[in-house]
Amino acid sequence: MSSDTIHNVTVSMTVNGRGHTVSCQPRKLLSDALREDLHLTGTHVGCEHGACGACTVLVDGAAVRSCLLFAAQMNGADITTVEGMANPDGSLNTVQQAMQDCHGLQCGFCTPGIVVTLTAFLRDHPDPTDHEIRVAISGNLCRCTGYHGIVNAARQAARGEPASSVEAQSSESQSSESQKLESQS
Amino acid sequence: MTTSTTHTTVGRYIGQSVKRREDPRLLTGHGRYVDDVQTPGTLHVAFVRSNYARGEITDLDITEALRVPGVEAIYTGADLNPLCQQFWATMTGPPIELGGETPYPPGSVLAQDDVRYVGDPIAVVIASSRYIAEDAADLVVVDIEPRTPVLGLHEAVASTELVHRELKSNVSAAMPMPTVPQVEALFANAPHVITRTFRGARATNVPMEPRGLIVHYDRYRSEMNIRAATQSVHEIKSFAARLTGLPESHIRAVADDVGGGFGQKMMVLREEAAVIAAGFKLGTAPVKWIEDRRENLMASNQARSEAGELSFAVDDDGHILAVKADFIEEVGAYPPSAGATAALAIGVFPGPYKIPVLIPGCTAVYTNTVGKSAYRGPWALETIFREQMMDHVATEIGMDPIEFRRVNLIGPDDLPYTTATQMVYENITPTETLDQVVEMIDVAAFRDEQARARQDGRLLGLGIAGYVEPSAIAFGVLSSDPAVLSMDVSGKVQVRLGTGSHGHSIETTIAQVIATHLGCDIDDVVVIQGDTATSPVGPGTGGSRTAVVAGGAAQTASIELRDKLVRIAAQLLEANPDDLEVEGGVVSVKGTPQAAISFAQLAMTAHMAPDKLPAGMGPGLEVAARYRPPTAFTWSNATHGCIVEVDPETGIVDIKRYVVSEDCGQMINPMVVEGQIAGGVAQGIGGVLFENMVYDANGNPLATTFLDYLLPSAPEMPDFEYGHVESMSNTLGGYKGMGEGGAIASPPALANAINDALAQRGVAALTEFPFGPSQIIDAINAAG
């Protein structure tokens, strides 16, 4: 179908607490509308087939993949993106702070999806087991961290465990051991 | 032996797990990746690609596509290829026809006349949105007469069909294994000769941010601006200059945040070159291409399609007498150079062991698949195959694999040690890291547990792997890194580096180095990188180099700037420079803290009152430093230990523990070191258990979504356990690079653990990745 035969639709939605009206083609993905029409580029597009989770946003409180939704479906919806996750004073929220404390991010590309997913998960599951944490982020792919720092961040956010990432290990894991060889002679 | 040179002590910042200053922007959605830059008037690119692995283009018709409203231009190979002047990478140097020494595949940005892999770009569609560009791309008519593709490692060598008709052979590089009569005699007389063939699973880097770039050539200014997801802004700038013939000084390349690279964004690949050429031809508006995931999995360069036949001659005490190693690797159609990494792999093959004789051979072959690129530890096959072989040999001669390693390890008394391949290790600690892993795991207790589990029908296994990592490879353009450090009038500093931000925490770690050596608060240091207009020329971020080389440059600059500040302070305080100390941005007289002067006061003097400076000293506070490590390789080392349980019913592998003991010299930031280990290990685990870029018999890639190309996800990953040994390198700062090692040693550690578990049931060891559930069940069934 040639694009000139496609008529735009008008969508009114609340994003991060503010009302927006977007006029776009009905085929436009929510992820693209957020990024291109509202310039909220924190929502990242990593696969466009709902597998990587980088584009996760909250729609009416539920964590969903914005690459699997059309913007046209969002009329009247209340959407929160990663840009709306920080505390009202702009400081990092509990999950974001734990992610920094526990080195839960390196390149940062998957990070918005992780922050949104974990924030929603911990809201609904304030006292998760380690296994529940790992399953909760099983739909968010990260290529940098091996998930270790992310899982530690979720532990800290949920349980208030130590902030220092190197020491922030649960009882199931071992602490680091260190040995200094000042000179080998 | 002793450690040498001017090592620093652990300071206020070096050695501390300082939290990353990159994080607040990335955690709140305020990173600036290439697709986040939205300039009005930008045009968007979609590629028309080949659906065939090999064939003749018999028709290419863009007429209908050009009629789509919003389409600005469609360029084919006939349009762009003639514009392209030179096609080579700075790291590998000019091609032979331009007087260099490096073989390259034929240089073209788009397929023209024929196609050479599925995904081969045929046309560039440029339109007002990506949606429209893709609409139009679908309307481009391409007829291809398919030809039999060249596929398979050994098959490609033997094939009479050619991947590149311009070349005489499918062999891109080769070093045949020599026949040495003395070695043949040694093998003939050895008590044990064990031979195995190992094979890797084709994998791809999968940065979570795919590739992408924006090219804006303004022909009226004769100026090209590039924004790219790249590991090296200077490389893409230099490449664009050579490709287009523009003076390099007319090109600026910027990379703000980059969503991972792992080697795939180190070199300029075909699509990036095509977009540069397209933007150059257009000459007006910015042209943006953001690779989608299907393109990334289908047409971004790949690695690990490699095999190796190893023969070990061993005596009755387990001493390795000699090794033959014959590698073959697939480089696809368009690697960035010859694509061969086996030559480097041979150089580092001895790893942590005393291998007195090594007879190597290697072959690299072009095939009708996407090209090979660097992937975290491009030479990793040497460790991946060698460390599996260590277990196979130990089993054959009836030794415990840890004991067999100990018999052959290079110990402290052997240093400095020169390997059979003439690599010199001055300070490595393979015995210490092995000891630490054995202790952390408690191997004796595990063996008891394993035996008890066997009684219950449960299959537990332990795998060990050691390696020595050739970090901070320092030859050619990689030889050095720059740092330009400047202090402003207020006494704060900026450092400009040739590196980039794609996950390595450089904004934090280099600030730690500078604050420590300059003697100031870390918040007074800003790190600037990723922009050729401000960053001095450097090779970029990759090859486990930044801590060693850029860190050395930053340290050099800091010490030089500090020295100037001290000399100014001595003049103003009327003191001897030797009596002064620097702490927290203040220079004071030792023992007389009230006799002090701040960096701010010194900076005002240097910039605003040059007549007050010591005689002969110039005004200003800038230092341009460049560091070249003393040796071509800075060796780090580690031992990995892994415990798994294999479910004999499902073939699923559960990683119960994963332990790494790492020696990367002086750690700048242990948190960052451990993050690099964890990420690398996860990639290595993926390469054993999940990741497999399969091509069918027609050359079609079968894993072009994340539902087919399986990445490790959180439930499959263990908590990693870290041990550290710190032996100083001979580089400035004592640092050793370690970014790739996690991905290098984890595949054999996991493979050995799985095979140890399977051996509990008498199942023969697997040798070909992946070790997925189906392969494991097949092996169990075959054992009966």
Image: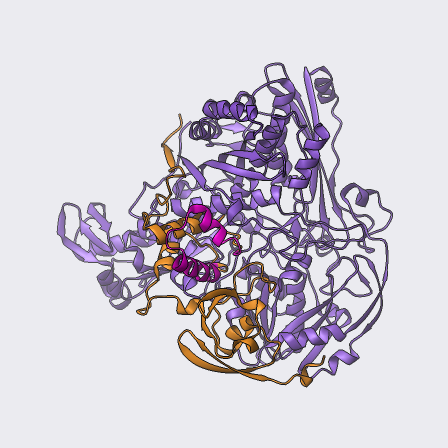
Tally of numbered discs: 0
The chosen color scheme is by chain
Instruction: Give the image location of residue B97, x and y in percent.
Output: 74, 55
Quarter of the rendering occupied by the N terminus of chain B:
top left
Which of the chains is purple? B
Q: Is residue A128 magenta?
A: yes
Chain letter of the orange region: A
* Vertical position of residue B449 compared to residue B767: above or below: above
Q: Is residue B208 left or right of residue B664?
A: right
Percent x, y of residue B73? 70, 78
Residue at 52% from the left image edge and 34% from the top image edge: B642
Q: Which residues are magenta?
A: A111-140
What's the residue at 62%, 22% (across, down)? B395
Which quadrant of the figure has residue B564? bottom left
Residue located 40% across and 55% down the image: A125
Asked whether residue B671 is drawn in magenta, I would say no
Instruction: Report x, y in % for residue B143.
Output: 84, 68
Whether residue B269 is situated above or below residue B14 in the rendered picture: below
Q: Residue B642 or B204: which is nearer the viewer?
A: B642
Q: Main secondary structure of the magenta part?
A: helix
Closest to the observer, B565 or B8: B8
> Image quarter for residue B248?
bottom right
| B183 and A42: which is toward the camera | A42
B753 to B36, vertically: above or below: above
Q: Is residue B656 visible?
A: yes
Q: Position of residue B669 (x, y in %)?
A: 38, 46
Q: Quadrant of the C terminus of chain B?
A: top right
Q: Is residue A90 left or right of residue B505?
A: left
Q: Is residue B768 visible?
A: no
